[in-house]
Image: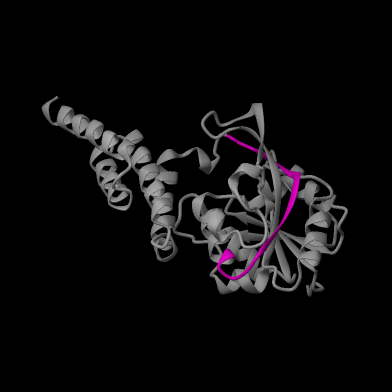
Amino acid sequence: MIYPAAFVTAVIPAFNRAPSIRAAVESVLGQTFRDFELIVVDDGSSDGTAEALAGITDPRFRLVVHPQNRGVSAARNTGIREARGRWVAFQDSDDEWLPEKLEKQMARIAAAGPDCVGAYCGMVIVGTAEAGSAGGSERYHPGPEVGPREGDILDTLLGESLISTQTLVARRDLLEQVGGFDESLPALVDWDCVLRLARLGPFAFVDEPLVRQYFSDNSITKSRQKRAFARERVVAKNLDLLKERPALLSRHYRSIAGERRRLGDITGARAALAEARKLSPFDARLWLLSAWLAGQGLFARTA
């Protein structure tokens, strides 16, 4: 079948999400903005995810199936390759878009002008990565304290991840230009991809909670080891820019040291702190942490 070109392509990667995939799809099909197609990429599910979508007759909906599981980034990249739209938006298989999400983002993109590479919006995070629970606390992200959230946000993004994939709409040609999502990263793939996009131009921002993110039991964000490895990779991939911002790079090395320590890798933590000290030699906290870690290493050798 030949599908007409849509202004926006929405992509949902799904792996073993039979209980939640239908609600995620309906939150996209229920958008007040109507000029889009929706591609669900079933990434080798074995729990009936594809069957859960049976009966959807909306002509904007398409299902693409990976015969084997290849990972969420590969699924998103398949969606980008299959896309007919000029813009690509991403939804997750267990989260929810509010009905006006695309309408407000596309209006903001139009107002931002032709140089705009993408847009994102605020989201409400339900539960915590540590608890892996969709109950309890809720918080809004990103708040105004993080720094500039619109326009040239490269400096802000170099400090921290602002844009979760479910909130992102980006130009398809630029997603292809930067290589899509890094399939070798086990976590923080949204931060990595958006950093590459932000090198190319400005972002628009809708400061409203238009996405609800729910942490589930198999949320990749829960894995401390995966996040620690991914942070180191993202920092290494952006060293050209971070070396021009030594205080920020030092802060990243300090965070890496903390993650390594929590994983029990005292040697790795000490090495990361040594890099931080080179960049911030007068930061007394780094020297105190180094001394404490030296004691931990001595204890480990004598235990």
The quarter of the displayed image where residue 224 is located: top left
Could you say which is closer to the camera, residue 180 or residue 93? 180
Residue under the image location 65 percent in, 42 percent down: 143
Residue ranking furthest to the left: 302
Q: Position of residue 232 (x, y in %)?
A: 38, 52
Q: Position of residue 99 (x, y in %)?
A: 84, 47
| Residue 142 seen in the current view | no
Q: In the picture provided, is 292 more to the left or to the right than 120?
A: left
Q: Position of residue 262 (x, y in %)?
A: 35, 34
179 to 99, vertically: above or below: below
Residue under the image location 67 percent in, 42 percent down: 94
Residue under the image location 45 percent in, 55 percent down: 185
Could you say which is closer to the camera, residue 157 or residue 100? 157
Q: In the picture provided, is 230 more to the left or to the right than 51?
A: left
The quarter of the displayed image where residue 105 is located: bottom right
- Is residue 152 rendered magenta in the image? no
Could you say which is closer to the camera, residue 18 or residue 235? 235
- Residues in magenta, as a range: 198-216
- Is residue 199 rendered magenta in the image? yes
The quarter of the displayed image where residue 87 is located: bottom right
Residue under the image location 54 percent in, 28 percent down: 131
Q: In the picture provided, is 235 more to the left or to the right than 113?
A: left
Q: Position of residue 284 (x, y in %)?
A: 31, 37
